[in-house]
Image (spheres, rainbow, N blue to C red):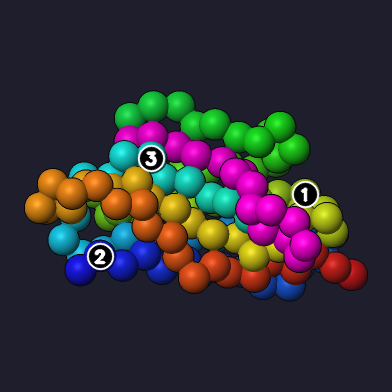
């Protein structure tokens, strides 16, 4: 069984910073792309940032220069450092992992989400 768990969401003031963490555990053979998404109330889920196992990170235009995604392949973790946060970035943030299990089956894992609230 494979599990994905996020943490780090909190209430932060505009202009502040937060660091989200995501950990994948279980019977994993490999992890391809890891990514962060967010969904604000009444809006569709959107991709924030993604990072392949051995390539360059990609970011939504709205977060470039402020957010940084990083991963530790040895620990099967991915983090999202968010700086200069804006009120409109209040949302539930979800981690996603594109994996192959030890049975060589492919799966797309989603976490339960972590709430980020940007407000004074």
Q: Reply above or below: 46 against 119.
A: above
Q: Residue 55's spot in the image, x, y percent? A: 39, 27
Q: Earlier in the sequence, mark 3 or mark 2?
A: 2
Q: Residue 107's spot in the image, x, y percent? A: 29, 52
Q: Reply above or below: 47 against 44.
A: above
Q: Residue 73's spot in the image, x, y percent? A: 29, 45
Q: Residue furthest left?
A: 103
The residue segment tinted magenta is 39-53
Is 42 one of the magenta-colored residues?
yes
Dot label at residue 62: none
**Residue beneath label 3, please?**
33
Q: Quick one: 98 or 86, which is closer to the camera?
A: 98
SS class, disc 1: loop
Estimate how packed mark 1 is, as few (under 14), some (14 to 19) or many (20 or more) residues with alpha carbons within 10 Å. Answer: some
On screen, residue 96 versus residue 11, left or right, reads: left
**Residue beneath label 2, please?**
2
Spatial separation of the CA atoms under disc 3 and disc 2: 16 Å
Spatial separation of the CA atoms under disc 3 and disc 1: 26 Å
Can residue 35 be seen in the rendering of this structure?
yes
Q: Examine the image and state in which quarter residue 118 appears.
A: bottom right
Spatial separation of the CA atoms under disc 2 and disc 1: 34 Å
């Amino acid at each position: 069984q494979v599990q994905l768990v996020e943490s780090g969401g909190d209430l932060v003031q505009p202009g502040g910073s937060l660091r989200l963490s995501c950990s994948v555990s279980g019977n994993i053979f490999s992890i391809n792309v890891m990514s962060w998404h967010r969904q604000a109330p009444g809006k569709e889920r959107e991709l924030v940032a993604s990072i392949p196992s051995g390539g360059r990170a990609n970011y939504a235009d709205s977060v470039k220069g402020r957010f940084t995604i990083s991963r530790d392949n040895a620990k099967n973790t991915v983090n999202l450092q968010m700086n200069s946060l804006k009120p409109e970035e209040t949302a539930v943030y979800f981690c996603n992992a594109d994996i192959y299990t030890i049975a060589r089956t492919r799966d797309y894992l989603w976490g339960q989400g972590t709430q980020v609230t940007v407000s004074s």
